[in-house]
Amino acid sequence: MRDRILLCLAHMSGKEQDFIKEAFDTNWVVPLGPNVNGFEKDLEDFVNERLTVNNEVGASDNSSLLNAHCSLSKQVVALSAGTAAVHLALIACGVGPGDEVIVQSFTFCASSHPITYLGATPVFVDSERDSWNMDPELLEEAIQDRIGKTGKTPKAIIPVALYGMPYQIGRIMEIADRYEIPVIEDAAEGFGSRYDGRMLGTFGRYGVLSFNGNKMITTSGGGALICPDEAAKQEILFYATQAREAYPYYQHERIGYNYRMSNICAGIGRGQMT
């Protein structure tokens, strides 16, 4: 196995090879370690960097609304896949059996499958013409329809940055705020895309990233969840590491998942972040 991995390294950049070799040399061949911590720090620095946008050349009319959503001190958890990030974000938003979650209809199945993992039901909303992403008018219509028919507000909204294109963030966030529904941004294809100078994934309560082989940067497989603060990050870490309680022996009081990113994969990500 080691020989096969080293053969793959021959096709990587020097930085990627350095990080992975260090992992082998220090015996950090596990789903935690210095590369995971370093990759998370690199991602946090990147997503929290705000670029100045001249209002005359493209800033939206909703800038004050969007800025109010985030102090740009987001925390990031590196995970085994973007799908895992969607799953854990839904758990953090309290989604469970019998709930409904609004999701974009024109997307890959990973945006909706985690909804069903939790016994909830996806409510699909069609796209608007300009971005091919979730139509804000149809979103509000769907919310009102579900409230009228079920007496309950959907538990979350998952818009998707299809092909890296931002959706109508200002309008969707305004609707979500009015109905007090948390937004989970599926920015799996949108790493590096910005709206009003801010990284996609930093406007909603949670933001999903993917580092699969077809994404802007890759860790061969993997993803990350952008969290609003340190407390939210620790909750996600808890569920991503089998929900193990803080005892000197194995004790589990809630259902957890084996979702942490490998230290080897994170080494590839650190090299690509350079």
Image: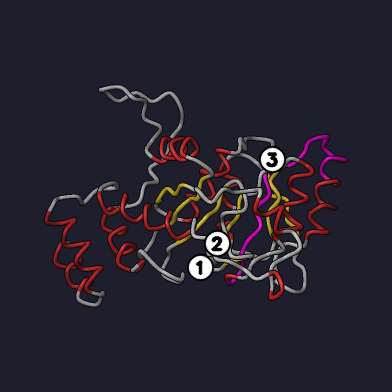
Q: Residues within 10 Å of mark 1 (few under 14, many from 20)?
A: some
Looking at the image, which residue is at 64% across and 48% down? 69
Q: Which of disc 1 and disc 3 is earlier in sequence?
A: 3
Q: In x, y percent, where is residue 33?
A: 25, 47
Q: Is residue 94 left or right of residue 253?
A: right
Q: Secondary structure at mark 2?
A: strand
Q: Amino acid at mark 1?
A: Gly
Q: In x, y percent, where is residue 70?
A: 59, 49
Q: Which residue is mark 1?
A: 192
Q: Which residue is mark 3?
A: 155
Q: Which residue is mark 2?
A: 199
Q: In x, y percent, where is residue 116?
A: 60, 45
Label 2 close to label 1 by CB (< 8 Å): yes
Looking at the image, which residue is at 30% across and 25% down? 250
By what rule are the colours in the image chosen?
secondary structure
Q: Is residue 148 left or right of residue 274?
A: right
Q: Between marks 3 and 1, how big is the CA–CA gap?
A: 28 Å
Mark 2 vs mark 3: in front: 2
Q: Amino acid at mark 2?
A: Met
Does the magenta run of residues contain 77? no
Q: Amino acid at mark 3?
A: Lys
Image: magenta residue range? 146-163
